Image: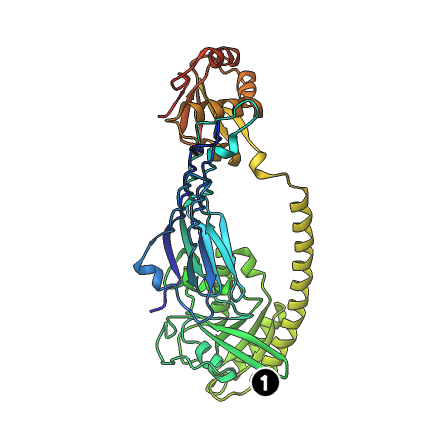
Amino acid sequence: MFVDEVEIQVNAGRGGNGMATFRKEKHVARGGPNGGDGGHGGSIILKVDTNLTTLLDFRYNHRYKAQNGGDGGSKDMFGKNAEDLILKVPQGTVVTDVSTGAVVADLTQPNSKAVIARGGIGGRGNAHFATSIHQAPKFAELGEPGEERNLKLELKMLADVGLLGFPNVGKSTLIAAVSAARPKIANYPFTTLVPNLGVVYVEAERSFVMADIPGIIEGASEGVGLGHQFLRHVSRSRLLIHILDVSGLTDRDPLSDYEILNKELALYDAKLSRLPQVVALNKTDVTSDTEGVDALEAELINRGCTVFRISAATHTGLRPLIYHVMGLLEILREEARKVEAEAARESVQIVASMTDDDRRWEAREEEPGTFIVVGRGIERMVAMTDFGNTYAVRRLQRSLDKIGITGKLKALGAKDGDTVRIRDIEFDYDDEDMWDEELESSTAGQPRHISEP
């Protein structure tokens, strides 16, 4: 069974918790902290397997969860890192986040990999938090939660040339004639129910991949028939061979078919409609209306089309068509290499100029009396805080003060009793000076202005 679109849920492993312990050897006075770190949670990784041609395996299993990292131990014993969960997919798989629509990965190269859900880092043991002032920290970090995502996997065939045409115009016959592909061929609509790839060898070191794809019909851009399935696979092509049936054995008008299909391409994706096209007038060996074919060819040429007369069944006219397509592809490939090289240079410059994402944060008023703080590093810090441990909570508050979040909230107009939300934790805002006084006088118990929902 050919499956080219599925949705899955992935949950990376949580990091192991750090440990808060102290040395207790008999002859070691004032033994210091020796709690070990937790291990990292397992990530979920997609890896291309060139032997796969379908997403069938994902249809029967929609949920994937990686292992959690091991907890840290005493005597500076670190928890075990969890193994990554590797899922194999066909080449040409595109991964999209369902909630945002953002493309997470586009796996076009053999053996390429992509992390689609990152495992949480392990919490640090209390040995990391000892300072000259606080020599015996009584807290450790929790492990960071692993990423959870709902993802859509789409398989888009990787072909230089896509065959464009209504059902039963001869696409399967053409690919069988010019390549080693052997698709099933019969005389009824929607013969090709799954895409077929064929490698066309023109001459030494000159070849290209051609895709024989399910036929498109009017309304395909809206999902009619096999529309979206077809258009998804043709979207990666560098150029299209538009095949028209000129046999006269059907009631279809070749020129009308040409216009309808190009309209559907434009409605689905304007980029597709701008791809170079070569028109192949097929089944010329059985046509009786030669004047009609002449008129059609003249009209298409007048519209700027390059036209070839062929018969895929008898292999007539295939050599000029294939050599012309090969020449166009070589030009397009060179242009693509230049664009990719330029994009790579720009990407390096952008990465070099970016600051560390973990240091970025933003505070804003979501609604009257409610403020929200977002930022990768801040959210991680909150998620890894043990809110059942007073000392851990105090450290979090000092960190928020040091980073400047408390001052920013005050500048935004936060008042005593307002709600401050970071990740899924809610804080009751108090004046910063009041918090400092409370820290100095408080000896035990969780600060009153920090609470979990």
Q: Position of residue 109 (x, y in %)?
A: 54, 64
In what element is the residue under mark 1? helix
- For the residue marked with disc 1, what is the amino acid? Arg
Quadrant placement of the C terminus: top left
Residue 214 lies in quadrant:
bottom left
Q: Residue at x 52, y 83 (%)?
A: 178
Quadrant placement of the N terminus: bottom left
Q: Residue at x 44, y 45 (%)?
A: 39
Q: Position of residue 158 (x, y in %)?
A: 51, 67
17 relative position to 179: left or right: left
Q: Is residue 195 above or below residue 151?
A: below
Q: Which residue is mark 1?
A: 319
256 relative position to 208: left or right: left
Q: Position of residue 442 (x, y in %)?
A: 44, 13
Q: Residue at x 61, y 70 (%)?
A: 305
Q: Nearer the viewer, residue 322 or 112?
A: 112
Residue at the extreme front of the image, as rendered: 27
